[in-house]
Amino acid sequence: MVSCIAFPTRGALFLAAAALLCAPAAAKTVVVSKGGAHPTIASGIALAGPGDTVLVKGGVYQENVEIPAGKDGLKLTASGSVIIEARPAGGAGNGPGIRVNSSAVRISGFIIENAANDLSPPNYLGYGIECLQDGLKAQDCAIYACSKSGIYASACDDVEILGCLLAGNIGGVYVKGSNAKVVGTILSNDQKGTIDIIGTNARVAKCKVLVSGESGIVVSGGGAVIEQNEIQECAERGISAIGSGEKVTGNDVRDTGMDGIYLSSANGSTVKDNSVRNAAGRGITTSGDDIALKDNEVRSAASYGIMTSGAGCTISGNQVSDVLDYGINANGDFHVIQGNKVERARGIGVCMSGDQFVIEKNKVSGCFDGYQGIYVAGAATAGEVRANTVSRCADCGIIVANALSQGVVIAGNSVRECCSSGAGAAVQVAGGPHDLRSNVIKDCGADGIRVEGPGNLVAENEVMKCGRDGIDVESGAGNVLRKNTVKWCCAEGIENDAGATGTTVEKNVMKQNRIDLANSGTGTQSGNSFNSGGWSTPPEIE
């Protein structure tokens, strides 16, 4: 049998050779070491091509490192303790420690010191690392005593700064570009030590900013995630974010010279699980619509605890204490203020200015210096104040203050030990019609309920042991008082003042008040129950 052997054709040989010629060269490693074949970092970079690794052995390298164009994907890696001393002999400035002009460069493990401004052309500035192309990744670097920012990247997308330490520089981190990530990085004692990012979809996580002459973290552009950072002793704001869709969560902010957390134009943002203490401005400030402020803690702020402006925001589960102005201040329509705890505010506990709001299940106590627990300001319409607990406030527990307001429901609230100044009322409404129903009011220093407006329904409330009237209708036409229980009040149980006309007083129970019913206005009375025994000293109320 004869075997046939097939030989490759000339065309197949040509294609195979072309494939070999076109195959990318394998990445190589260039080793730099003091006294070696490549004693400077610059000499190693000169030999390296795109995607290669320059491995720098331990030692002090007194040079300003330049990664020029055409070195995309270069990896500059320190092995051991590698110090780049950016001041040349004589101490004059010569620009950045490392200057990057290729994309996707990786820099890891270096100590960079003393970069200073170059006063002669080309006038490079004293950044620790300066990047001018996309995709920089700086990891595990320490940068000290530079005359500009520790890390500076201008017009660069996809920059990552991971696990770096910046201390004693004039500036901190500056990135202008989208998709920046700064994770696990520490800034300490930088004169202007801010993590400053301009661009969309930034992430700043698990960083520390300690003792800065400016703000701690500043991000503008929208879509940022700022989470689990620690910020202390910043001369300005702790965190500042401008743009929609921000997520500011789990941060610890202390001892700021201005607001602890500040968001602007922040539609659809979330501010959650943050702790703010000792802010010289407001604890948390936001502006924008549909913002969620949830489960934050604010202690000891020199102004408002939480302030929001916009529409449709949810403020829930927050704890605010020891602030020198309002605990929570919300401006705009459709807000929900729910389940918050406000203690010892030197101002109003919860202040709402807007329409169609819900204020429910909050606990407000200890508002002092003449202020109220819950205050509805402006010509409010169609709001709800439900199931709140208000205690030990110097003025009103709950007040609807504007004579043009109407349609507010105040129901199921507990108000105790308010009006310690003797002014106001535990629950006070101006305007109308409003619905005041099923509230429990005890041991307050002035009127229990006061009505100053027309068409209000006051029904099924329980008022006990108040310093003046139990229910006082001061003015307005057509108010209805129905099925209320009033006991042990120091003046009238129910008073219908001369300014009130057409008041209906029906099926109320009045017992052991100084005077059960006083009527100098006009209206009708039916089915009421009075105590025949007159005034008696009220018992202790549980």
Image (spheres, rainbow, N blue to C red):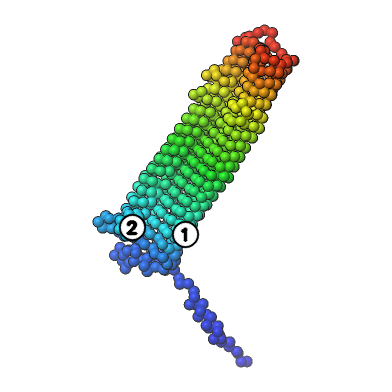
Residue 412 placement (x, y as % from top left): 65, 27
Amino acid type of the residue that numbered disc 2 sits on in the rendered structure: Asn
Nearer the N terminus, badge 1 or badge 2?
2
Kindly identify the residue that appears in the image at 61 percent across and 30 percent down: 379
Residue 123's tag is: 2
Q: In this figure, which residue is indicated by the disc labeled 1? A: 135
Side of 179 where 167 appears, left or right:
left
Location of residue 44 with respect to 390 vertically, above or below: below
Which SS class for mark 2? loop
Category of crowding for the residue at label 1, using alpha-carbon neighbours closer than 10 angstroms: few (below 14), some (14–19), many (at least 20): many
Alpha carbons under labels 1 and 2: distance apart = 25 Å
Q: Give the quarter of the figure containing the C terminus.
A: top right
Residue 514 placement (x, y as % from top left): 62, 10
Residue 308's tag is: none
Side of 362 where 83 appears, left or right:
left
Amino acid type of the residue that numbered disc 1 sits on in the rendered structure: Gly
> Can you see residue 486?
no
Question: Which quadrant would residue 9 be assigned to in this image?
Answer: bottom right
Location of residue 45 with respect to 16 vertically, above or below: above
